[in-house]
Image (tube, rainbow, N blue to C red):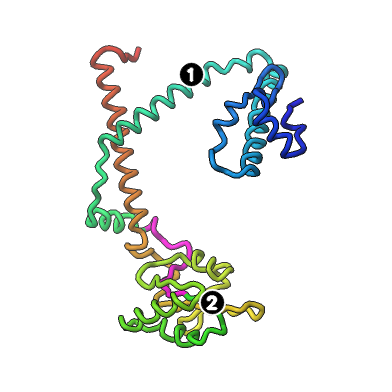
């Protein structure tokens, strides 16, 4: 049996790590202290070191147990994995070469006009799955003298009020942020309220979302500056995704061109023939 599976205490694992060269064995396979130590980061606590050691030992042991079991139970024809290994080797080499080829040639400069063109041409892929909002959020103790003032002023767009609320809330509130200029996914905001977005939006009244738990000492409030519940997401909300789509398309174009070029070159040189 596997030595690691019989370990019942941290002290035993610690002893294996520090006092003996061989720390585990599965049949004829041995795990050495140097291999184990190479896996464990330096500077972590003794308890964390022990947990990582035990995790690694069990993972290492399971691999060899399954391998040995397969060798003993599978017929010889199923034990030959040379073709799969060769296929994996070729795929890995191709992947690495493609990565290098793309990294050397990919044009990462994307203009706003290019992004807008893509957005307008593919608006169907940017339809909202959930509502998005622009909000100001505060989590503040009910006993705070400034509570009502801050919540009221959160609705103001006057620059002086925005600065005042930001300064005041950051000094007295448990948490405050102003995302009135950026879109936020409803599910992300709901996490700050500790609920799901449907329940959260059911509390939207007069542009405020408020959750007040009688058993808690704080109150959580968001002022909704703007909300979009359905349809195509605004361009600015999709900007990062658009960049990823464009870059992904450019990568595909490079790789298709590379494959075609290599096939043509090999054909011209006579190293690739179809009989």
Q: Which residue sits at x=31%, y=15%?
A: 272
Picture residue at 65% right of the left edge, 23% below the top: 21
The residue drawn where x is 59% and y is 15% is: 80
The question of residue 180 being in magenta is answered with no
Residue position for label 1: 86
Front-lying residue, 230 or 31: 31
Quadrant for the N terminus, please: top right
| Image position, residue 123 (x, y; %) | 35, 58
- Between 156 and 82, the residue placed more toward the observer is 156
Dot placed on the residue nearer the N-terminal end, 1 or 2 = 1
Drawn side of residue 108 relative to residue 232, left or right? left
Instruction: Please give the residue where the numbered disc 2 appears in the rendered image.
Output: 220
Q: Residue at coordinates 65% horizontally, 44% vertically from top-left?
A: 47
* Label 1 environment density (alpha carbons within 10 Å; few <14, some 14–19, many ≥20): few
State the SS at label 1: helix
The answer to whether one can see residue 62 in this image is no
Number of numbered discs overlaid on the protein picture: 2
Q: Position of residue 261 (x, y in %)?
A: 26, 26
Residue nearest the observer in this picture, 161 or 172: 172
Label 1 and label 2: CA atoms lie apart by: 59 Å
For this orientation, the residue located farthest to the front is: 19
Magenta highlight range: 124-137
Q: Which is more toward the observer, 194 or 252? A: 194
């Amino acid at each position: 049996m596997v030595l690691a599976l019989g370990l019942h205490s941290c002290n035993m694992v610690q002893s294996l790590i520090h006092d003996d060269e061989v720390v585990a064995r599965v049949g004829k396979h041995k795990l050495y202290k140097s291999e184990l130590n190479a896996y464990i980061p330096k500077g972590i606590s003794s308890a964390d070191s022990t947990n990582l050691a035990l995790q690694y030992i069990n993972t290492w042991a399971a691999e060899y147990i399954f391998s040995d079991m397969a060798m003993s139970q599978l017929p010889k024809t199923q034990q030959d994995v040379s073709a799969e290994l060769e296929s994996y080797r070729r795929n890995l080499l191709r992947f690495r070469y493609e990565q290098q080829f793309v990294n050397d040639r990919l044009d990462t400069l994307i203009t706003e006009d290019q992004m807008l063109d893509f957005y307008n041409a593919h608006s169907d892929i940017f339809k909202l799955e959930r509502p998005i909002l622009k909000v100001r959020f505060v989590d503040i103790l009910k006993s705070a003298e400034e509570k009502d003032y801050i919540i009221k002023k959160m609705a103001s767009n006057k620059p002086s009020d925005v600065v005042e609320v930001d300064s005041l809330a950051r000094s007295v509130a448990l948490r405050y942020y102003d995302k009135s200029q950026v879109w936020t996914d409803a599910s992300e905001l709901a996490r700050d309220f500790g609920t799901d977005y449907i329940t959260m939006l059911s509390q939207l009244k007069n542009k405020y979302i408020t959750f007040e738990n009688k058993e808690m000492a704080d109150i959580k409030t968001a002022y909704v500056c703007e909300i979009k519940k359905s349809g195509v997401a605004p361009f600015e909300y999709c900007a990062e995704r658009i960049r990823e789509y464009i870059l992904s398309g450019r990568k595909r174009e490079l790789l298709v061109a590379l494959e075609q070029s290599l096939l043509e070159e090999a054909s011209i040189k006579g190293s690739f023939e179809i009989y």
